[in-house]
Image: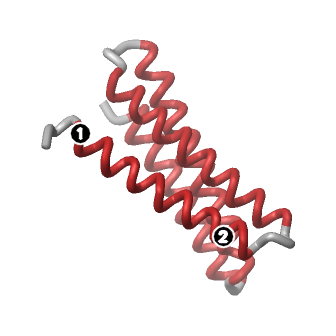
Amino acid sequence: MDNRQCPAVTTMVGFAVLACNSALAVRNSWGDAGSVAFVLAADAALVLLFVCLREFERAGGGRRRSSIKAAVWALTTLLTAMFASRVTPLMPPAVGAVVWAVAAATAAGGFWAFFLNP
């Protein structure tokens, strides 16, 4: 099998698993509009992140690559904050504060790695 086909096959399998998992999550949360919206928003962000990463790989360099990096960082920060916001209500306040601190450190570390690290 050609090396260029392997990522396409694994990507399609990954999207199929994501679609099945999301369909089950929506089905289980059908009465809760907030949970359904969370699942759909997270899926949209993941798909957009994948598209941005593909474009980043194809971009030659310069300003286009920098703007794609900014979009990747924004999407990963959004996903981190979304998941932290869903997890923290289930935990004691002190642990929730740690979760938010780790989420903030992750976002700051990503910003440093993408934009400040030479």
Can you say whether 3 is above or below 92 in the image? above
Q: Nearer the viewer, residue 31 or 112?
A: 31
Identified at 59% across, 53% down, the residue is 79
Residue 5, labelled with which disc? Answer: 1
Q: Specify the farthest residue to the bottom.
A: 92
Can you say whether 51 is above or below 88 in the image? above
The residue to which callout 2 is attached is: 25
Place of residue 43 in the rendered image (x, y in percent of width and height, measured from the top left): 61, 52
Please tell me how many numbered marks the rendered image carries: 2
Foreground mark, 1 or 2? 1
If the image is split into quadrants, where does the C terminus sit?
top left
> For mark 2, does the 10 Å Cα neighbourhood hold few (<14), some (14 to 19), or many (20 or more) residues?
some
Q: Secondary structure at mark 2?
A: helix
Identified at 51% across, 41% down, the residue is 49
Place of residue 28 in the rendered image (x, y in percent of width and height, measured from the top left): 72, 76
Place of residue 27 in the rendered image (x, y in percent of width and height, measured from the top left): 72, 71
Q: Secondary structure at mark 1?
A: helix
Describe residue 62's horizontal placement relative to residue 29 as left or right: left
Disc 2 marks which amino acid? Ala
Can you say whether 47 is above or below 95 in the image? above
Disc 1 marks which amino acid? Gln
